[in-house]
Amino acid sequence: MNTNILIVDDDTTIREAIHDFIGLSGFNVFTASSGEEALELLKTTDISIVITDIIMQGIDGFKLTELINETYDTDVIMMTGYGDKYSYEEVITKGASDIVFKPMRLEELLLRLKRVFKERQLRKERKIMLKKLEELAITDELTQLYNSRHFYKQLDSEVYRRGRYKHPLSLLFLDIDYFKKYNDAYGHLQGDKVLIRLGQIIKSCLRMMDSAYRYGGEEFTVILPETKCEEALIVATRIKDLMGNEKFMPISGNIVKVTISIGITEYRPDERISSFVQRADKAMYIAKENGRNKVASLNCEFRN
């Protein structure tokens, strides 16, 4: 955790006294004699907490706090010798985390600093936890691809973007051929290895803007923004060929090949998302009907 603290006060005696006292408590302390100097230091140094006097020449403590809140992830503790003029409620409203009134005991300042620092740590831990929970909610645990719930949310966003910017949008539906027979013959643990490897292969073939999903069971989908059908065909063929070249060994000494069937289609202006998805799904079943280990398309206009 970042323990950098910045003391801002135009009184050299107060500034140095706080620096020395807080430094003895394990914090890494910087100092500035003005708001302007503080802002220059913040440009180059990651500061967790700024302790600033309110009344200073040039940029005062209130303005400094405002500028810090606009740009930096930094907490502010204000100091003032005018307890009758400024209140806790006012400084909190201005964006500070606490206030200390002069003359002050350095021990009290340290306690308040530690409290703000602890609250800062708790906020960061909570933010990390919420991010992890959000990722878990939209991620398939086995393949680490997105799940079907997130698929529809993202597809809705991409369709909206397609309508706004008139860029092409293609969709792939993938299904593992004879996967039930594979599971029945070798067990679900071996089947899971196939699913995991297919997820890895799909991800290896995509750009940053593309996204892949485990739709359910052995079915996968891929959203390809700004992609026409002929370009989607290249991606689908690459995924199919890479998977077909994989060598699985569910039983020692017994190499097994696993193939996939893929359907592709391109979004039509103003069509329902359900129709778009159903057409990609139907194209996949056409690939299966054509002998599996194939790529098939529906309503695609391929250009030379």
Image (tube, rainbow, N blue to C red):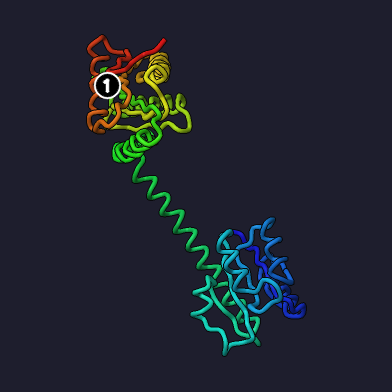
Q: Position of residue 165 (x, y in %)?
A: 40, 34
| Residue 140 visible in the current orientation | no
Image quadrant assignment for residue 276: top left
> Which quarter of the rendering shows the N terminus?
bottom right
Using residue 98 as the reference point, say whether residue 235 is left or right of it.
left
Q: Position of residue 76 (x, y in %)?
A: 58, 70
How many numbered marks have been drawn onto this rendered protein structure? 1
Using residue 252 as the reference point, say whether residue 280 is left or right of it.
left
Q: Which residue is mark 1?
A: 179
Tag 1: amino acid: Phe
**In this picture, is 290 found above or below 221?**
above
Sort mark 1 into few (<14), some (14-19) or many (20+) by Cα contacts within 10 Å.
some
Residue at position x 57%, y 76% from top?
112
| Residue 26 visible in the current orientation | yes
Q: Secondary structure at mark 1?
A: helix
Residue at position x 57%, y 79% from top?
99
Q: Position of residue 154 (x, y in %)?
A: 35, 38
Quick one: 90 or 204, which is closer to the camera?
90
**In this picture, is 61 found above or below 167?**
below
**In this picture, is 179 found above or below 211?**
above
Q: Position of residue 277 (x, y in %)?
A: 26, 29
Image quadrant assignment for residue 289: top left
Image quadrant assignment for residue 248: top left
Residue at position x 31%, y 38% from top?
156
Q: Residue furthest bottom?
A: 84
**In this picture, is 3 found above or below 176?**
below
